[in-house]
Image (spheres, rainbow, N blue to C red):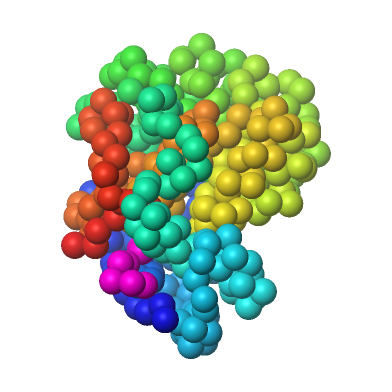
Amino acid sequence: MMQLHLKKYILPLKHTFRISRESHDFQDTLIVCLSLDGLTGYGEATSNPYYRITVESMTAEIEAIQNEIMNFEFTEPEIFHQFLVEKGLTNFAICALDLAAHDLYGKLLKKPLYKIWHTNIDSYPTSNYTIGIDTIENMAAKIQEMPWPIYKIKLGTKDDIAIIRELRKHTNAIFRIDANCAWTTEETILNAPLLKDMGVEFIEQPLPADDWEGMEKVMHKSVLPVIADESCIVETDVEKCGLHFSGINIKLTKCGGLTPALRMIKKGKEMGLKIMVGCMTESTVGISAIAQLLPQLDYVDMDGALLLSSDIADGVKIESDGNVIFPTLGGSGITLR
């Protein structure tokens, strides 16, 4: 019989994290612990005001079916995931449970997930490090404080081009831009060549999530690739994004965990899309799950634990050059502190 434990943590951030629509100094997160045969798997999902998800709402959902989860005959994460979908849980709650199930499964088999999936870690993309919206001086200071090979710069201000122009003076690193739905079609098309000249690799979600007509124009006229984030939430979004974006950014919390993410990666690749997986300021619990997907990705944004002033778990470690140290423990390799 599986044992289930839920833990709420408040993760403190090193800096106030601001994007075009919100800012915060702490991140609430739910850790799910699933135990079987003396081993425990850990999963995570953070709260999110944009999607109206709180730790309390996720906890209530999971506790409502706690007995059914504990009596579930666990064999494979995919079968467990299907059971959770049929129970009507939100994707955030399903994600936390699915990540815990995968971690537990790998620990039971004594194999990291990337090996179970027949991928190897000889080659993988480097994670970007995110610079949230702030004064230009503070954004420049953050870059100097955290030298990194790739930065994701959050934009959506009246000074967006000036910000990149100033930040470029402080580093030769690759830049990626994330406007979090804050730009217009015309703004995106006009900004793209200026940003390209300043070493920007791609633009993430410039327009509101449902502006498909605007994105079609951007796709035809932008000199930079455009990656979907808020427009690509669940599996059924992948096909639609294929006509309007160069690639997709998959978030485990939004799609419902590793099980659907693996299918989204496969579908996206079949369509010729670039594949990215992003984080939602998770601790090392969530980041270690993302890291198992690395060999399958073109880009990754897994800096969540790096943005924290203190962490709650051990697992995958990211070094200052972007190199990843994978634990030898099975599953996602997580131990809770």
Q: How many marks?
A: 0
Camera-nearest residue between 208 and 150: 150
In which quadrant is the N terminus drawn? bottom left
Residue 151 lies left or right of residue 53; in this view the side is left
Query: Mainly helix, strand or loop, the magenta region?
Result: strand
On screen, 130 above or below 35? above
Residue 37 lies left or right of residue 125; in this view the side is left
Give coordinates of residue 148: x percent, y percent. 29, 26
The answer to whether residue 109 shows anywhere in this view is yes
**Magenta-highlighted residues:** 36-44
Give coordinates of residue 219: x percent, y percent. 73, 27
Tell me if residue 40 is in the magenta stretch: yes
Q: Which quarter of the picture shows residue 106?
A: bottom left
Q: Which quarter of the picture shows residue 174?
A: top left
The structure residue drawn at horizontal position 57% and vertical position 49%, both measured from the top left corner, is: 261
The structure residue drawn at horizontal position 35% and vertical position 19%, both measured from the top left corner, is: 173
